Amino acid sequence: MKNRLKVLRAERDWSQQDLAERVGVSRQSVNAIETGKYDPSLPLAFTIADVFGMAIEEIFLRE
Amino acid sequence: MNAKKATRKALLWGALFTLNMMLITLAHIFDLIEQPVPLILMAINFVLLVPMVRAARGAQEVKGAMSPALRNYNRRVLITMTLYMVAMIGGGNLYHRIEEGSPLLWLLAIAPLLPLMGMIWTMYRYYVEETDEYLRYRAVTGSLVGLMLVLVVGTVWGFLEMYGLVPHIWNWWVFPVWAIGLAIGTCWPRGDRLEAEG
């Protein structure tokens, strides 16, 4: 699954650590999701969407 | 220290531990050393797991893979491992001084079992306490690799033993072999590009 996490972070000038703290996960988790190594669960995807104030489908895209 | 260096340090300690375990086991299997020497050597070898756990903890911190549940896990593993070493070294030294059939042997046998059960409880607590789903996924994957290793080694050895090709070995080998598989499965690189943080 593709995602726009890196771009969205850059727009807000957030590091992976910043996003991790906002979402409440480890930086490694953010990295794994961002690089497409790990697809988050639906609850985590909702949390990430809430942090960015966007809908899930605006962040996570189908291949 | 960067993430790669920190991980390599932990893996080196783990590899040294595994190599020593294999050498001791082979020396025992081929009758180069008699009990309780292998038992004591193995227990002493467990000391290597202390720097390994500490190095792994350092690597987890550097990689940003640390969580409160993981901190609890590392602390509990170090405590149970230390108790286990004390029980094993103590048991290995006392074993031949106690009369056969003595109820004291029960104490010697149970002493290392308690911290081992503690280690299993520690793992269970980690899976329950970990709220970071990616870290939990990694731990579960590691534990499945450990299980696969136990199944492969156990099945292969069992068949070889059945035909008298290899000697019988005590069943507690399952724990260290599973732990080695857990370490391999958890540390196996998944292509996480952690240096690409930005």
Image (cartoon, coloured by chain):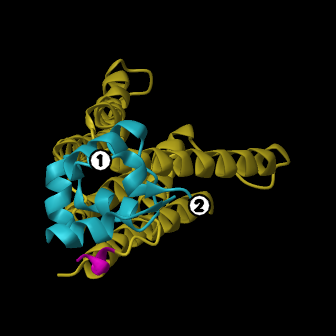
The vertical placement of A47 against B191, above or below, is above
Q: Chain of mark 1?
A: A
Q: Which mark is residue B31?
A: 2
Residue B195 drawn in magenta: yes
Percent position of residue B139, x then y: 40, 48
Q: Which mark is residue A30?
A: none
Colour applied to chain A: cyan
Q: Which residue is disc 1 drawn over?
A: A49
Of the residues shown, which amino acid type is indicated by label 1?
Answer: Ala
Colour applied to chain B: yellow
Q: Residue at coordinates 54% horizontally, 65% vertically from top-left?
A: B27
Q: Is most of the magenta stretch helix, strand or loop?
A: helix
**Quarter of the figure with the C terminus of chain A:** bottom right
Q: Which residues are magenta?
A: B194-198
Percent position of residue B33, x then y: 50, 61
Other residues around mark 1 within 10 Å, as few (<14) / some (14–19) / many (≥20): some
Q: Is residue B58 in view from this perspective?
A: no
Percent position of residue B11, x then y: 37, 71
